[in-house]
Image: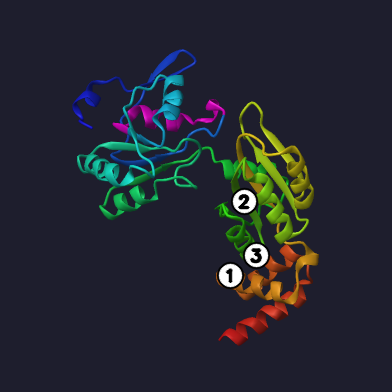
């Protein structure tokens, strides 16, 4: 990773056949969001950052190369993923120490969201280097706004455990959260995960969002049990999956569930706001929820 070849290369990107110059960004680590499917989803700022950087750290050079080729960007690539991070991270930090502009991308979407890279950001900050986010596409947010479910409060779970026993345990822990849940899943595991979710959460409204922004984009909506039945019969779908699951239904709220939801909300909200949030999520009378919140707070003090 020498600087000499990079200093002489053209810092350009191309749009609709027109080449545009890219100014060299501020030195530091730039966390750049890339398209989740449709290459047209990339931002102008992302293109200029990638073209102006000294090096791009990416998960799979073949995938990132497709994006760069589309926009005529010639910035050198360095593979940085879970299997080589311990060896590659010091080299990237050394480049930052030289004053280089390092751009970090994932295969798709916003880096660090269920993707490798957190330790590089942590190390860069500890060493005193700037970390600059360049926001853009995110599969979790794209699914959330397309699902037709409450968006005022949501919890991003990422991937559920691969093994059914651990997955069911985690689902039981998520059951009382008074928020919409956003879950990533692979196609092969989707039918069994939906079955476990339906068993643990009941017939909550949900959406299976597949291949977002790609040619075969699909959003299938319905109760969890109906979605589980559909994919049990149809079999595992192809592509990347985001599950969006509605908050607890009023019928699900037992006294124990209510207390658990209130304790979670009280950890970060006032009694009034916690009661309002839980009452909205569960459909229970606000006055009764507020009274229970006061009782819990008094008992915890």
Q: Is residue 10 magenta?
A: no
Q: Pointer 1 and pointer 3: residues touching (CB < 8 Å)? A: no
Label 3, residues with CA under 10 Å away: few <14, some 14-19, many ≥20:
some
Label 1, residues with CA under 10 Å away: few <14, some 14-19, many ≥20:
some
Residue 182: numbered disc: 2
Residue pointed to by mark 3 = 172
The vertical placement of 278 against 13, above or below, is below
In the displayed structure, does residue 144 sit left or right of residue 250?
A: left
Q: CA distance from mark 1 to mark 3?
A: 23 Å
Q: Position of residue 213 (x, y in %)?
A: 61, 31
Q: Please, which residue is most extreme toward the top here?
A: 17
Mark 3: which secondary structure? helix
Q: Residue at x 43, y 32 (%)?
A: 46
Q: CA distance from mark 3 to mark 2?
A: 15 Å
The vertical placement of 254 against 200, above or below, is below
Residue 186 in sight from this viewpoint: yes
Relative to the observer, which residue lies in front, 15 or 263? 263
Which region shows up in magenta? Answer: 38-55
Residue pointed to by mark 1 = 269
Q: Could you tell which of marks 1 and 3 lies nearer the N-terminus?
A: 3
The vertical placement of 199 against 83, above or below, is below
């Amino acid at each position: 990773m020498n600087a000499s070849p990079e200093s002489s290369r053209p810092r350009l990107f191309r749009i609709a056949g027109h080449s545009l110059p890219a100014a060299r960004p501020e030195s530091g680590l730039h966390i750049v969001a890339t398209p989740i499917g449709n290459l047209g989803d990339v931002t102008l700022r992302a293109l200029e950052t990638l073209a102006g950087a000294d090096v791009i750290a990416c998960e799979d050079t073949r995938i990132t190369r497709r994006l760069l080729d589309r926009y005529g960007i010639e910035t050198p690539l360095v593979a940085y993923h879970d299997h080589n991070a311990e060896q590659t991270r010091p080299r990237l930090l050394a480049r930052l120490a030289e004053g280089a502009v390092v751009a970090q991308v994932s295969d798709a979407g916003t880096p660090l969201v269920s993707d490798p890279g957190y330790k590089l950001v942590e190390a860069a900050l500890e060493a005193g280097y700037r970390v600059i986010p360049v926001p853009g596409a995110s599969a979790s947010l794209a699914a959330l706004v397309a699902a037709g479910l409450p968006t005022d409060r949501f919890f991003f779970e990422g991937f559920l455990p691969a093994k059914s026993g651990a997955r069911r345990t985690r689902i039981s822990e998520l059951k009382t959260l008074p928020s919409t849940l956003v879950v990533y899943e692979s196609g092969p595991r989707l039918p069994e995960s939906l079955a476990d979710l339906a068993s643990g959460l009941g017939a909550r409204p949900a959406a299976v969002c597949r291949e977002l922004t790609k040619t075969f984009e699909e959003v299938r909506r319905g109760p969890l049990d109906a979605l589980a039945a559909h994919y049990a019969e149809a079999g595992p779908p192809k592509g990347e999956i985001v599950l969006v699951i509605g908050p607890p239904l009023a019928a699900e709220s037992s006294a124990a569930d209510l207390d658990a939801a209130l304790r979670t909300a009280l950890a970060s909200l006032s009694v009034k706001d916690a009661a309002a949030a839980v009452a909205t999520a569960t459909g229970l009378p606000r006055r009764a929820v507020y009274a229970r919140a006061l009782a819990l707070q008094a008992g915890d003090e």
